[in-house]
Image (tube, rainbow, N blue to C red):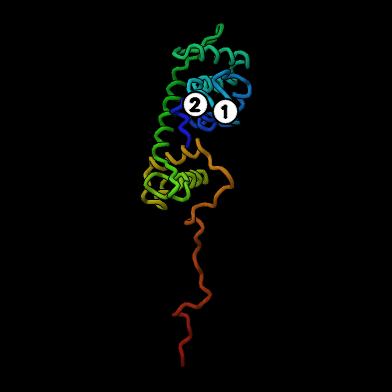
Amino acid sequence: MATSIALQTLSANEAACVTGIPLKQVHRIIDTGLLGSAAKNRKGSRVVLRGGLVGLKLAYETTDILTLDGRRRLVRYLLDHPRATAARESNVSVNVQPMKGEVRKGLSMLARARKMIAADKGILSGTACIKGTRVPAHDIAEMLANGDSVRAIRKAYPALTDAQIEAAALYARAYPRRGRPRRGPSWRDRKQIVSNEAAFDELPLSR
């Protein structure tokens, strides 16, 4: 897994995960050029500079308040003044301190999730699993997405903690599984075995 956070760039999926912005909206904001040089194309993939994350959040949260040009000027101001506590443009001023706090929290949570999930070629052919287990992170995330409670997951996988389950869900959002969807966990497919043979106490007594 590329250490994009350490390199100060994030994929569109990582940026969506950190900021809490829907992935579709992240792409839309990049498409409109609102992030300027804070968003780039590298090897056919979009990346957002770490310094552009608050600008991404600002662009999203002012969607229904300002015009496209107004949002662009605010984001540009913020990118030019990264330490500013407010983005200003003409008579408009937006407090960005809460956004900065949310981005810092998102980055911290993603960093923690990355430490709790590992892909080892010797375990399930390199599938990303929760460290110390053979439980795929994406399987846990899919269970949550399908409506399973944390309690139900803990019952199915007693060795997991609430923190590991949360980390798996976050990791899966930032690094979605590629290729065809895998089948659900094997324990979900287990069905009660019904024998065609009569039970012993139902057999007729010999005469």
Tell me if residue 177 comes above or below residue 99 in the rendering: below
Tell me the residue at 60%/13% (across/down): 70
Tell me the residue at 60%/24% (across/down): 30
Secondary structure under the numbered disc 2 in the rendered image: strand
Number of the front mark, 1 or 2: 1
Pinpoint residue 151: horizontal percent, then vertical percent: 41, 47
Q: In the image as oriented, which residue stretches furthest toward the bottom?
A: 207
For label 2, the residue is: 9
Report which quarter residue 29 is drawn in. Answer: top right
Pinpoint residue 207: horizontal percent, then vertical percent: 46, 93
Total numbered circles: 2
As shown in the figure, which amino acid type bears the numbered disc 1? Arg
As shown in the figure, which amino acid type bears the numbered disc 2? Thr
Instruction: Give the CA distance from mark 1 to mark 2.
Output: 10 Å
Tell me the residue at 37%/51% (across/down): 158
Q: Nearer the viewer, residue 92 or 54?
A: 54
Q: Nearer the viewer, residue 180 or 188?
A: 180
Horizontal arrangement in the rendering, residue 143 relative to residue 72 (left or right): left
Which tag, 1 or 2, sits closer to the chain's start? 2
Tell me if residue 136 comes above or below residue 192 in the rendering: above
Horizontal arrangement in the rendering, residue 27 relative to residue 103 (left or right): right
Residues at circles 1 and 2 in contact by the CB criterion of under 8 Å:
yes
Disc number placed over residue 164 in the picture, else none: none
Horizontal arrangement in the rendering, residue 183 relative to residue 205 (left or right): right
Q: Neighbour class for label 1 at 10 Å: few (<14), some, many (≥20)?
A: few
Q: Neighbour class for label 2 at 10 Å: few (<14), some, many (≥20)?
A: many
For label 1, the residue is: 42
Q: Nearer the viewer, residue 52 or 123?
A: 123
Secondary structure under the numbered disc 1 in the rendered image: strand
Report which quarter residue 110 is drawn in. Answer: top left
